[in-house]
Image (tube, rainbow, N blue to C red):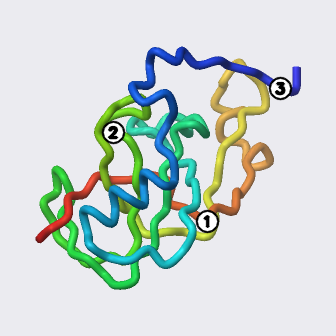
């Protein structure tokens, strides 16, 4: 099978849909009072447990701001200035709350993904270099939640 279809229960979404780019822009402007300089881009990232990429429906929106803002990492409490935010529903894509994120680590141009040769997951199949591939990504692999510092 080359294609897998999966349905969504509409009762899971309080607003009937996942976060739209228009909602992401509105939430960002209200929180930052900054202009958005580019059309938002949907970004697929690793889930919180870093075990698998999230469903496309749960993508975050990459928002470019016209000038940097100060953010504080939730949990780390470290502050920094950023001109790019990632916006999504949190703690999951069926939640009411819209939250802001930044890359958890510096962006790389490519990530190595291990692809097992077979499903027995032996040491040989997991760590065989011939079964690995470099993926070109234009987004962070994982996101960390931040709050806007006023």
The N terminus, quarter of image: top right
Other-residue count near label 3 (Cα within 10 Å), few / some / many at <14 / 14–19 / ≥20: few
Q: Is residue 11 above or below residue 143?
A: above
Secondary structure under tag 2 reads loop
Q: Secondary structure at mark 1?
A: loop
| Residue 50 circle label | none
- Labels 3 & 1 near each other (Cβ < 8 A): no
| Residue located at (44% from left, 25% from top) | 13
| Residue 102 locus on image (x, y percent) | 36, 61
Which residue does the numbered mark 3 point to in the structure image?
A: 3
Image quadrant holding the C terminus, namely bottom left
Rendered image: mark on residue 138: 1
Element assignment for label 3 = loop
Which sits in the foreground, 11 or 109? 11
Q: Is 135 left, or right, of 149 in this rendering? A: right
Residue 59: image location, x then y, percent: 53, 45
Q: Which mark is residue 90?
A: 2
**Tag 1 or tag 2, which sits nearer the N-term?**
2
Tell me if residue 122 comes above or below residue 113 in the rendering.
above
Q: Residue placed at 47% from the left, 43% from the top?
A: 19
Furthest residue in direction bottom, as rendered: 67
Q: Position of residue 123 (x, y in %)?
A: 63, 31
Q: State the separation of the CA atoms marked 2 and 1.
A: 22 Å
Name the N-terminal-most of marks 3 and 1. Answer: 3
Cα distance in 3D space between marks 3 and 1:
25 Å
Q: Residue 142's spot in the image, x, y percent?
A: 44, 52
Q: Nearer the viewer, residue 2 or 133?
A: 2
Q: Residue at x 70, y 18 (%)?
A: 120
């Amino acid at each position: 099978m080359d294609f897998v279809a999966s349905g969504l229960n509409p009762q899971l979404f309080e607003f009937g849909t996942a976060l739209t780019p228009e909602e992401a822009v509105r939430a960002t402007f209200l929180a930052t009072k900054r202009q958005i300089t580019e059309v938002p881009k949907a970004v697929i990232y690793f889930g919180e447990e870093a075990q698998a990429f999230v469903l496309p429906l749960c993508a975050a929106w990459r928002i470019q701001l016209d000038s940097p803002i100060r953010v504080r990492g939730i949990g780390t409490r470290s502050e920094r200035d950023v001109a790019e935010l990632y916006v999504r529903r949190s703690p999951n894509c069926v939640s009411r709350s819209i939250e802001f994120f930044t890359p958890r680590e510096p962006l790389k141009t490519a990530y190595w993904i291990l692809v097992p040769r077979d499903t027995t997951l032996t040491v040989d199949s997991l760590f065989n270099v011939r079964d690995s591939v470099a993926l070109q990504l234009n987004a962070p692999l994982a996101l960390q939640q931040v709050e806007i510092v006023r």
